[in-house]
Each structure stands twice: as C-alpha cells, then as structure tokens.
Amino acid sequence: MGRKISTACVQGGYEPKDGEARVLPIIQSTTYKYNSADTMGKLFDLEEDGFFYTRLANPTLDAVERKIAELEGGVGAMLTSSGQAASMMSVTNICHAGDHVVCASAIYGGTFNLFNKTLRELGIDFTFVNPTASEDELMAAFKDNTRAVFTESLANPSLVVTDIEMYARCAHAHNVPLIVDNTFPTPINCRPFEFGADIVVHSTTKYMDGHAVALGGVIVDSGKFDWKKGGYTMLTEPDETYHGVVYTEMFGNMAYIVKARTHLMRDMGAQAAPMNAFLLNLGLETLHLRVPRHCENAAVLAEFLENNDKIEWVNYPGLKSSEYYELAQKYMPNGSSGVISFGVKGGRDAAAKLMESLKLAAMVIHVADARTSVLHPASTTHRQMSDEQLADCGISPNMIRLSVGIEDIDDILDDFKQALEKI
Ligand SMILES: *Cc1c(COP(=O)(O)O)cnc(C)c1O
C-alpha cells in the first residue's frame, strides 16, 4: 500500500474517468444491460468480471468495498446489510453443521446470540473463552473439528483488548483462520491483518458511518490464509452451482471473499443498499479526522471521571489504571475508541439520576457516532435482570456506557460537571 490511510479515506475506491461524476454516484439500479448473451453467460459462470444483478454486486457498493479493503490492507471486501450479516457470513462461509468455532466470550451481545443460539441451532458448535485466558487455555479450547477463531479487537461493551498476535498464533497452529471484528477501533486505530488476523469484519453502523444514519457491515479478506493447507473443501473443491468452479484455483488469494459474494450473498441475500453505501462512503471520507477526535475527547473525559469522587470506577483502555493498557499500547497506540464505561457511587438510582441530568449527552441505544451519548444498561437494555443476573453478564447496576462524541470537550465536561452536582 503506497499512499497513507487518510488519503485512502478520502479518495479510495473510486477513480472517475474523464467527464464522470467527481463524487461516487449512487447507482440505484438492480440490473445491468448487455448486448450479448455470451457475455452474460460468462458473467454467470464467473469467467468474466462485471455487474449483472445488485444482489451480487453494484458499482456504488464496489467502490466502497475497494476503499475499505485498502483501509484494512486486504485484497477484497464485501458490504452487507448490517454488522450482524457480516459476522454471520464470515463464519458460515467456511463453517458448516458439525464444525466448531473458538470464540472470545467478551463480544457484542448480538454476535453472542447469533453464535450461541442461531448458529448452534444450525449445527455449528462454539466454545467461548474468557478474556483472561492464557495461550495454553486458548489452545485447549480447540477440537478436531475447529474451523475458525473469532474475536473482537476491542470488545463492545466490555472494552477488553484482544491479544491479536496470540489469537493468530493459536489459530494458525491449528491451520484455521482468525476472524477479528474491528468495529470499535476502526482501521484508523488498529489494523488486525498486521498482527496476523486473516479476516476482518465490521459493523459499519458505528464509527465508519459515524453519523448514525445507515446500518451496514463489511467482511474484508487479507488474502493471506492458505485454505488448501487447512483443508477447506468448500474453497478447494468444485462448486457445482457454478459449473464446478474451484475458488482457490480460479480466484487465488481472493477465494474466500469471492465465495462469500458469489455463494452466500447470492443464496442468502443480505446485500447493502446503494444509498446506504453512498452514506457510508461520506462517513469514511472523514473517518481519519473523526476517530482521533473521539479518542482525544474520551481520554480527557475518562481522566476527569477517574478523578471525580462521585465515580466508583472507570474502564477505558487508554487509562494507566486499565488492565488492558499495555495491550492497547501495542495494538492501538494512537487511541482505542470514544467508548468509556464507568460506575457511579450510589448504585442503580444514582446512575439513573446522573443519566437523566445530562443535557448534551443523550440517552440512546446506539454507540460510536458524532454525538455524545450514554446508556444505563441496568435500567434499559438489561432492566428485567436482577443485580445477580447482571453480575453474570459483567454488568454492574451502577454502570454507564458512554460514547464520547466529537463536540467541544469543554462543553462535554461542563455537561458532566453539572449532572454530577445533581447526585
Ligand atoms: C453493533 C455491533 C455489531 C452488530 O452490527 P449491526 O450493524 O448493528 O448489525 C457487531 N459487532 C460490534 C462490535 C458492534 O458494535
């Protein structure tokens, strides 16, 4: 990769020819016209590259996919309708009923449900490993039928930082790929392929979009994993639905991502909309400016909260007091993300009161967009649970999840100061 990541954010993926639109156009069309039946036939047999139906590929999506592949340093990418669809397809592209996946337990709740219930019901087995697992414990989680390892670079919402190199070592020792959900740090702060990850997924709904306007997801292929050595027959043996195409032979180091598109996207259909890809691209054009600002503001606020005597604890990987400080320095030295969690003295009621007293910071379920927002899991997303049940999920009754935005830090601080005075 020659150019810098900031330039790729602004200009990646789309290079207009003479007289074409300077801004990536929204190609709002499901179909594409051809003059020859022969050309269309070749497209269907994957012998030629081109657009024929938007469920498989669309020029607006294609440009954004190229941009994100460049940002992560991968060989190819595929946009999906949501982050959930990206996680689902990243696994089901290479795991079938009877297969097993080793997965970090500190992952996004939606991903946990997808894996632990829905994919289990489809016959894929999972072993969840604790964030504090040592290399030996991680190695012990593998079985003969393990086909993938899944983790988040920076977990939502626990903010656990994964030792990506250790995960990659264990995965590769068993000839299976490491899939990393890199949603929170984004490629601006962490590039998992540089530490041995093989596949990266994102919920683009968060910082990549950055404005909370469009759901989306993406899968990125590093092109580095050797599918033949791992015995992934779905990639190394003929696919009868494409006249016997063998992905590794026909597409080389893009076998995984081409199969995800031509097989899974064709059959399951969780395609991103061209309009959403356009909006995502607008977000990506300023990702390199927004992410550092989120981190700068979060670092100031985390330190302020840590020094406030109405606050019981603060969890932010950039704080020296964090048990993930060292790992964060290694894997995301320029900052982790704008997300902080903290506990208010006085329990559930004090936390709820603080939340209600905030004016600039809004109460929303979303995280990771331009506006500062807060969520009190005990009185919202997890309100049906007792304090003991909350503890089992790693959530304390006084915990507030704070997503620091890109407003002026003085105004954010003032908002927290006035709200803290009310409790
Ligand atoms: C939000 C989120 C997802 C799910 O993404 P959606 O776009 O909401 O489907 C997956 N992983 C992480 C880390 C997330 O934060």
Image (cartoon, rainbow, N blue to C red):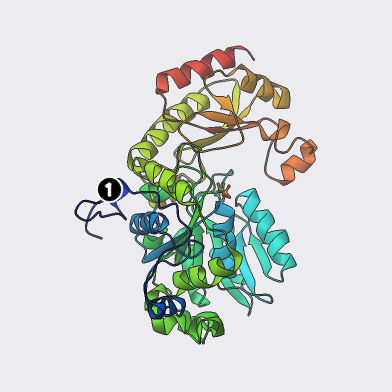
Q: Residue at x 54, y 44 (%)?
A: 159
Q: Quadrant of the C terminus?
A: top right
Can residue 149 be seen in this snapshot? no
Badge 1 amino acid: Ala
Secondary structure of the residue carrying numbered label 1: loop
Between 349 and 141, the one nearer to me in the picture: 349
Q: Is residue 112 above or below residue 268?
A: above
Residue 312: horizontal and vertical position, in percent? 61, 28
Q: Is residue 201 left or right of residue 22?
A: right
| Label 1 beta carbon within 8 A of ligand 1 | no
Question: Callout 1: 10 Å neighbours few (<14), some, many (20+)?
Answer: few
Residue 299: horizontal and vertical position, in percent? 43, 32
Q: Is residue 123 above or below residue 292?
A: below
The quarter holding residue 334 reads top left
Between 90 and 325, the one nearer to me in the picture: 90
Q: Is residue 227 left or right of residue 39?
A: right
Q: Residue at x 55, y 85 (%)?
A: 240
Q: Residue at x 54, y 73 (%)?
A: 263
Residue 93: horizontal and vertical position, in percent? 55, 71
Between 245 and 4, the one nearer to me in the picture: 245
Q: Is residue 422 left or right of residue 387?
A: left
Q: Quadrant of the N terminus?
A: bottom left
Which residue sits furthest front? 35
Q: Is residue 391 above or below residue 274?
A: above
Residue tagged by mark 1?
Answer: 21
Q: Residue at x 52, y 20 (%)?
A: 360
Residue 67: horizontal and vertical position, in percent? 35, 55
